[in-house]
């Protein structure tokens, strides 16, 4: 590492991780990196993190030595499309609020990388290719989805250059006019009108009323550390169960199942962890015409997400940030990884290898002896069962 200190990112798709790293290297803080990774995932992994997703984020503020939770739970839209219920898109609004409260860079700097990828094309990653191999056929009933994901009678595959012009236009509007454009501007009206034309119902009032919950996270003390998880209706209790040693159930996922996670830590001990859900693989399997927006599905497990951050509230020192993907039980798996690394002194690679996707995979960053106190102990990792990427960001 150079003298600037330790900073890192980890998420379920490689190009999104690279964008988060670049944001940190160019003066952004953990919140900036997390927002940029979210928008990047909406381009590169819409099966698990589209603009129609819901979820929860936790921010650890190194200045105030406090944490704040942003919960944007699934709320059913008034009218289904072809019998398929879908959720009111709320992630853009939540990430906008998070950036207003904690970001350092200009808003447009966090959205522009995703817009460029959508406009000029990006190679299909292993993570998306894996999801398409399992769920590509599920998109056949929707004309827009077939057009966007289709290729030669099949679907796009790993390494194919993928251009999404409509999504680029949507991201361009969000970049230029701010996130409010998505839930109360002209873009919101377009979403509402287009959904009505394909048989669904998403009135402007529904978009405006889907207000994210910004509040103190659910906490639990452990020695000098404090564990922060997402409050209800998110699944913070599952993450705490994992922290207390309750192993998650379920098999190792073979695809994202519509769940993803991202984490970012900056050199000042600021940290962000976000868990996102489309409800199921490719969400409602409907793309809103003219926008490139994949809608999330209203399913029983859609709200089963919780990131986790562990820090010292007395001195603001950072210890752990994690967020899972691949399954609803990933929240519990995240808690288990946190405890293994911080309290059992396991190396990150060892803890993730032992878990190896059981019940869901985990993206994590840990500094067991404190980021500022002993950055040499800091580690960033991904679950070996996933197709994600963890990167350390050296300063320039």
Image: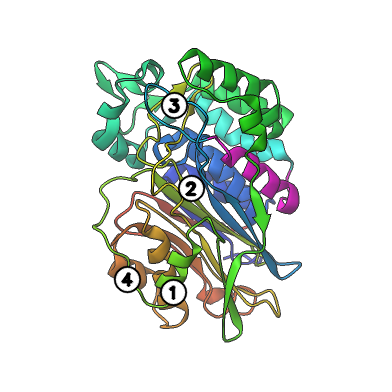
Q: Residues within 10 Å of mark 3 (few under 14, many from 20)?
A: many
Q: Between marks 1 and 3, how big is the CA–CA gap?
A: 38 Å
Q: Give the percent coordinates (x, y) of residue 239.
A: 45, 66
Q: Nearer the viewer, mark 3 or mark 4?
A: 3
Q: Nearer the viewer, mark 1 or mark 3?
A: 3
Q: Are marks 2 and 4 in contact (CB under 8 Å)?
A: no
Mark before the other along the chain sequence, 1 or 3? 3
Q: Give the percent coordinates (x, y) of residue 234.
A: 51, 56
Q: Could you tell whether 64 is left or right of 162 in the image?
A: right
Residue that mark 4 sits on? 247
In the image, is residue 90 part of the stretch drawn in magenta?
A: yes
In the image, is residue 224 part of the stretch drawn in magenta?
A: no
Q: Between marks 2 and 4, how big is the CA–CA gap?
A: 21 Å
Q: Nearer the viewer, mark 2 or mark 3?
A: 3
Residue in view at x 55 percent, y 80 percent: 369
Mark before the other along the chain sequence, 2 or 3? 3
Residue that mark 3 sits on? 80
Mark before the other along the chain sequence, 2 or 1? 1
Q: Quadrant of residue 284?
A: top left
Disc marking residue 285: none
Q: Give the percent coordinates (x, y) of residue 67.
A: 66, 65
Residue that mark 1 sits on? 243
Q: Between marks 2 and 1, how big is the CA–CA gap?
A: 20 Å
Disc marking residue 276: 2
Which contiguous range is marked in magenta?
Answer: 88-105
SS under mark 4: loop
Q: Between marks 2 and 3, how big is the CA–CA gap?
A: 22 Å
């Amino acid at each position: 590492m150079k003298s600037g200190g330790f900073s890192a990112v980890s998420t379920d798709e490689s190009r999104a991780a690279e964008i988060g790293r670049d944001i940190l290297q160019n003066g952004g803080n953990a919140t900036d990196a997390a927002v940029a990774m979210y928008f990047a995932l909406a381009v590169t992994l819409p099966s698990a993190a589209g603009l129609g997703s819901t979820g929860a984020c936790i921010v650890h503020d190194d200045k105030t030595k406090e944490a704040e939770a942003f919960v944007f739970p699934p709320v059913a839209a008034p009218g289904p499309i072809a019998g398929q219920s879908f959720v009111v898109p709320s992630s853009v609004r939540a990430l906008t609020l998070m950036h207003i409260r904690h970001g350092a860079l200009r808003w447009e700097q966090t959205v522009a990388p995703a817009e460029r990828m959508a406009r000029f094309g990006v190679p299909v990653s292993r993570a998306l290719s894996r999801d398409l191999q399992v769920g590509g056929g599920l998109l056949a009933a929707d004309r827009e989805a077939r057009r966007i994901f289709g290729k030669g009678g099949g679907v796009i595959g790993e390494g194919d250059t993928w251009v999404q012009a409509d999504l680029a236009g949507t991201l361009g509007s969000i970049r230029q006019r701010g996130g409010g454009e998505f839930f109360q501007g002209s873009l919101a009206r377009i979403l509402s009108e287009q959904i009505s034309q394909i048989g669904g119902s998403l009135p402007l009032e529904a978009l405006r009323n889907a207000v994210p919950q910004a509040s103190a996270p659910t906490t639990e003390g452990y020695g000098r550390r404090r564990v922060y998880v997402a409050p209800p209706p998110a699944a913070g209790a599952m993450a705490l169960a994992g922290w207390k040693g309750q192993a998650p159930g379920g098999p190792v996922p073979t695809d994202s199942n519509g769940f993803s996670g991202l984490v970012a830590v900056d050199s000042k001990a600021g940290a962000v962890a976000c868990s996102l859900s489309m409800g199921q693989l490719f969400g409602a399997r409907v793309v809103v015409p003219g926008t490139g927006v994949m809608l999330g599905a209203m399913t029983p497990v859609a709200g089963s997400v919780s990131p986790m951050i562990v820090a010292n509230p007395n001195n603001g020192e950072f210890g752990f940030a994690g967020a899972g993907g691949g399954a609803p039980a990933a929240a519990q798996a995240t808690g288990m990884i946190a405890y293994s690394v911080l309290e059992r002194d396991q190396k990150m690679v060892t803890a993730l290898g032992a878990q190896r996707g059981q019940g869901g995979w985990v993206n994590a960053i840990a500094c067991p002896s404190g980021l500022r106190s002993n950055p040499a102990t800091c580690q960033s990792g991904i679950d070996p069962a996933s197709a994600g990427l963890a990167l350390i960001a050296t300063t320039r």
